[in-house]
Amino acid sequence: MKNHVAIPCQLTGIEDFEWEEAYVFGFGSKREYQELKETQPSYTDKFFLISFIEDVDEWYGLLVRVQRLCDKKQFVLPLADLKSTDRKSKNYQLLDDYSVWFVNNR
């Protein structure tokens, strides 16, 4: 993947990240959710792909280092949880294919 994903690449979440589930489904406080989003990555954020992490995680697959656009904070996230924001780029289909493959082969 790292040899085929074109950089620069802007990403966002496919769906809510694991930590957000309780808040997205209405179990958690909206205020608390907004506070946590300041320090945690959110599926609604936009990120720049910085690099691939060399080690593959047994549970999460390929991991990537990203930088959130709004505040420049960096995070390590599973690539399978992300999609390209540019539907016309070659990255869009490549990342979608990887996510579908990863979910179906876990």
Image (cartoon, rainbow, N blue to C red):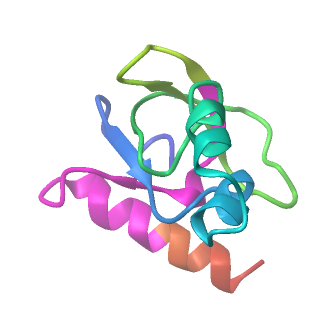
- Is residue 69 or residue 52 the one in the foreground? 69
Q: Residue 88's x, y, as percent? A: 12, 58
Question: Left or right: 105 with respect to 71?
Answer: right
Indicate the quadrant where residue 77 lies.
top right
Q: Residue at x 56, y 61 (%)?
A: 16
The magenta span reads 75-97
Kindly tell me whether residue 22 is visible in this rendering: yes
- Is residue 27 or residue 69 the one in the foreground? 27
Extreme residue in the right direction: 58
Q: Residue at x 45, y 14 (%)?
A: 72
Question: Left or right: 76 with respect to 59?
Answer: left
Q: Residue 93's x, y, as percent? A: 30, 67
Q: Residue at x 49, y 51 (%)?
A: 43
- Is residue 28 or residue 82 the one in the foreground? 28
Is residue 94 rendered magenta in the image?
Answer: yes
Q: Residue 73's x, y, as percent? A: 54, 16
Q: Residue at x 72, y 67 (%)?
A: 27
Work out whether 28 lies above or below 42.
below
Question: Left or right: 8 with respect to 44?
Answer: left
Is residue 96 rendered magenta in the image?
Answer: yes
Indicate the quadrant where residue 3 lies.
top left
